[in-house]
Image (cartoon, rainbow, N blue to C red):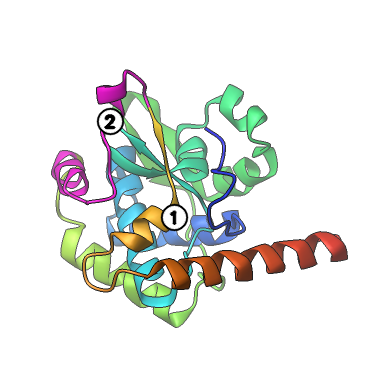
Amino acid sequence: MARPQNDIWFKFDPLKVVDAATLLLEKHGGRMKWLGLMKLLYIADKLTLEETGQSISGDFYVSMPFGPVMSQTYDLIRSNPAYIARNKLEDALLIWNKYIEKDEAAYEVVLRTPSNYQMLSRRELRILSQVYEEKGKSDEFELVDLTHGFPEWEDPREQGVNSLPLPISRVLTLLETSPRTEEEIESLRQEMEGQRNLEELLGD
């Protein structure tokens, strides 16, 4: 699914996604159900968004039957060749596969080698560790039930589809403890648009 055109756009950062995923896997003994990892990553991304107005991953979100999902991170975890090619994630998948492999039969992802976590800030490391300490012992279906209770999630099955766009602006508006105003959201959207335009101008 494509990123919503008029939403806040962060820059997807596969290096930070790998750092976050390998940190959680290392804390969990080196392997985890892929669905559970996906849920923990989303919870940490949302908490970082709430605290800082930025996300760890730079990813965009979608609502799927098993809850809200980081779209490009989901593609990396599932490693579906068609989605990888369509979303131009080949280079990101090479980075992912260096550190993490998939055990398809067990529905798990397995840590190949730890990262050095240099891409993550101290705040992001704290948030990821906090999320694991609070939620890491839950099984994947308990985490699905938890994220089904998030106010931003919509069940796509009610509209006869497998996924729905989940704008970051919607997540920010519906934050439980510090919802952002329309003015704050528009300011962030313009800030990210300006940053993206500058990066394009500089050829980044």
In the image shown, does 129 or 8 lie closer to the viewer? 8
Residue 26 appears anywhere in the view: no
Residue 77 sits inside the magenta stretch: no
- State yes or no: discs 1 and 2 in contact (Cβ < 8 Å): no
SS for dot 2: loop
Q: Label 1: few (<14), some or many (≥20) within 10 Å?
A: many
Specify whether 45 is left or right of 130: right
Q: Which quarter shows the C terminus?
A: bottom right
Residue 54 spot, x, y in % from top left = 48, 69
Examine the rendered structure and indicate whether residue 152 appears above or below residue 131: above
Q: Label 2: few (<14), some or many (≥20) within 10 Å?
A: some
SS for dot 1: helix
Marked residue nearer the N-terminal end (1 or 2) = 2
Determine which residue is flagged by label 1: 168
Determine which residue is flagged by label 2: 65
Specify whether 187 is left or right of 108: right
The residue type indicated by label 2 comes to Pro
Magenta residues (range): 141-162
Examine the rendered structure and indicate whether residue 3 appears above or below residue 157: below
Specify whether 6 is left or right of 163: right
Which residue is located at x 62 percent, y 58 percent? 11
Which residue is located at x 47 percent, y 64 percent? 55
Task: Give the farthest residue toward the top.
Answer: 160
Residue 183 spot, x, y in % from top left = 46, 71
Which residue is located at x 52 percent, y 42 percent? 72
Task: Give the farthest residue toward the front.
Answer: 183
